[in-house]
Image (tube, rainbow, N blue to C red):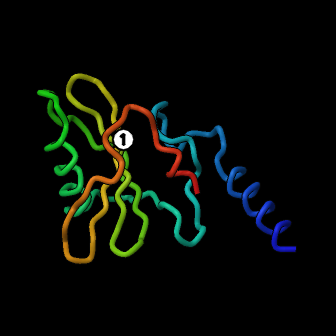
Amino acid sequence: MKQHLTAFLGIALLAACSQNPVTSTPTVAKCQPSEMAGSYRVQEAITPEAKEALATVLAQMNTSAKLKNIIEVRTQVVAGTNYAITFELDNGEVWHAIVWHDLQGKYTMTQPASKKPFAALCP
């Protein structure tokens, strides 16, 4: 019975990712927001903590381009908060990164900046 339940849950999780984009930007992860406990949730407002998480990413990127726009921030509550951030630089490149903000206040990039959206954003 456990194997059937595990298989069902795996299929259900895969089905949660659809081909309908969350925003009109084609490089944003193509998963619908989920109400499933523990999943990433789209944030309506860009918080100071999200900006600090992005500053951690930008400080580690090897580019002279500057931040143009924060496209989307998703958060996941863990032992602290994961910030999945999609952002655009002034050279037109769109990047994705995940930063963990631990309970002591430290920001650590857990998924380096990439031009490809992270599958981890799918619930």
- Which residue is rendered at x = 41% and y = 72% of the image? 78
Kindly identify which residue carries mark 1: 96
Which residue, as the protein is rendered here, is positioned at the far top? Answer: 91
Task: Please tell me which residue lies in front, 56 or 85.
Answer: 56
Q: Would you place residue 39 above or below residue 122 in this image?
A: below
Picture coordinates of residue 83 (x, y %)? 34, 58
Q: Would you place residue 74 above or below residue 61 in this image?
A: below
Q: Would you place residue 22 above or below residue 48 in this image?
A: above
Picture coordinates of residue 14 (x, y %)? 69, 50
Picture coordinates of residue 54 (x, y %)? 23, 50
Name the quadrant containing residue 7. bottom right
Given the image, on which type of amino acid does mark 1 rest?
His
Of the 4 image quadrants, the one containing the C terminus is bottom right
Q: Is residue 100 left or right of residue 91?
A: right
- Which residue is rendered at x = 74% and y = 63% of the image? 9
Q: How many labels sit on residues?
A: 1
Q: Would you place residue 9 above or below residue 17 in this image?
A: below
- Which residue is rendered at x = 88% and y = 74% of the image? 1
Q: Is residue 62 left or right of residue 32?
A: left
Picture coordinates of residue 88 (x, y %)? 28, 34
What is the secondary structure assignment of the residue under circle 1?
strand
Which residue, as the protein is rendered here, is positioned at the far front? Answer: 3
- Disc 1: CA contacts within 10 A as few (<14), some (14-19) or many (>=20): many
Q: Is residue 100 left or right of residue 11?
A: left
Task: Please tell me which residue lies in front, 49 or 114.
Answer: 114
- Which residue is rendered at x = 41% and y = 71% of the image? 77
Task: Please tell me which residue lies in front, 50 or 82.
Answer: 82
